[in-house]
Image (cartoon, helix red, strand yellow):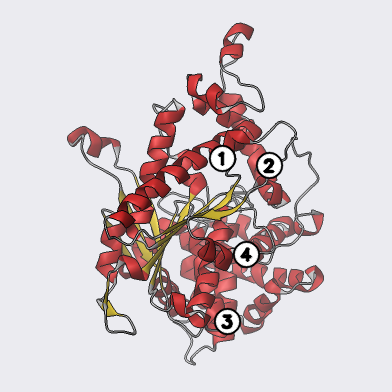
Amino acid sequence: MGLKGGKDGAKAQLRERCPGAFRVFDSLSECRDGVLPDERDADDHLLTKRQQTVVLGDGNVMLMQIPESACSIEAFSDILFSFVRDLVRSGRIAILVFDEPEAMTWAKREEQQRRDAARSARTVTASADIDAQNTLPKNFSSADLETFHDVHLLKSDRKLRMRLYDEAARRVFLRIKDLMSVWKSSGHDAGVLILDGVDIRGCGLADDEKRDPRIVGTDSRVVADFERSAKIGEGDLKLIAIENRLRELISSNERYADYRLCLTSTVDTDSLPIMMLDVAKRRTSPYRGALHSLFCMRTPPTKRAREEDCHVSSTYLCTDIALLEGLVQQHLWSLTTSKPTPDEMLNAMLAFASACALCGCDFTLEGLKGSRFDHFYESFPTFIRDEPDALRGFGATLARESAVARRACSGLQKVCATASAAMSVKKRYLKQSKSVSEVSETLLLRALWTCAYWSQVERRADDEWGFFSYTVAS
């Protein structure tokens, strides 16, 4: 998921080139305590650091991280419960988001079809009697799940998967409510848990009823504060939309005045450009209240670490997004003499994010042949200095009219030309530089569409933007 990886990919290169924006912590609570100063409320009472923190988590990522060995619904739900309990312990408000396939962009469905096809190609074909043991009816009950030998087999079918996920979420939600009741009876602040994008009926959904994912939570007032009129299909975009909503509430609602920190926990590296773009957009239209935002990527121990210590656990690579965006901006403008305006910095970040997409992501597949993120990164200051008109043209990326937004294609082509020129003087990169200079219009369009999508401007993914007709599985 996310941006193209490897040592030359965006995550690795940003960590290497902007080390001050990254720190490793053993847990989300340790991260919270490591960055928050002591604060007092309006009545001069000392606030706990949990009371100042909101934690956002990607439910689909958590569900996909559950090991294959947890094959019963009880074991499956137990591990999800432990993940969610950590969120609730770390922040007074914990919000877990889930993808909503019904509201997913066509481009995302195309990408999911490719994953499904790849998964099917790896699946071993079994005899009819074995297959019969590995399947459940479409509207399986909770009792059916209790006796099913391996719930992971349900994940290969998206409809069965969503019913499984809803049921696991329902069980975990009820257990967390019970846990909060115990905390409350002991005199502790129970906090709030919100699930965004589940049908809390789980396996209780009747045969004749349609799945209806909603926002549910342990506090109806907080649920109402975060409800939306428009659905968001992909969890990555929900996370930034919720963070934006939190900033609005901090600015306008006294019940949120004490929140200082938002931890976003996911492993999808798309969140790097998504959150950096949001920083650049906020610079042009700032919120009144202040909120520190950290992107936390859970990192399992390596095989070697597990062999050396069987008790070793996962860690979190945490990124201060505002600091990272500021360091990248310093690099982008390092060859210019005048101080950039907020609008110019937004245009630079739009160009940067478009290049991230061009180098490979879910919507551009393997990306531009011959491209490497580090080569684009190194050449960006030259582009910023030498192509002010092209840079200005990136402002069109967020235009609502597609015809206007597509004008940014010429600017992105010049980003490629600048990178190609820098590559051509490197040893062994002459052939790759030619490929980068000959980038197709289709790939330019897809990269710009992706940049706008990451900026929460979603357009129809059609042939106008380099996406082609295909059949979505029912």
Q: CA distance from mark 1 to mark 3?
A: 53 Å
Q: Which mark is residue 451?
A: 4
Q: Which part of the image, by quadrant, shows the C terminus?
A: top right
Q: Assess whether mark 2 and mark 1 are in contact (beta carbons under 8 angstroms).
A: yes
Report the residue that reaches farthest toward the bottom: 338
Q: Nearer the viewer, residue 62 or 444?
A: 62
Which of disc 4 and disc 1 is earlier in sequence? 1
Q: Which residue is mark 2?
A: 211
Q: CA distance from mark 1 to mark 2?
A: 10 Å
Instruction: Give amino acid for label 3.
Output: Asp
Which of disc 3 and disc 4 is earlier in sequence? 3
User: In the picture provided, is 358 more to the left or to the right than 77?
Assistant: right
Q: Is residue 439 visible?
A: no
Q: Marks 4 and 3: which is nearer the front? A: 4
Q: Is residue 316 visible?
A: yes
Q: CA distance from mark 1 to mark 4?
A: 31 Å
Q: Which residue is mark 3?
A: 386
Q: Disc 1 on helix, strand or loop? A: helix
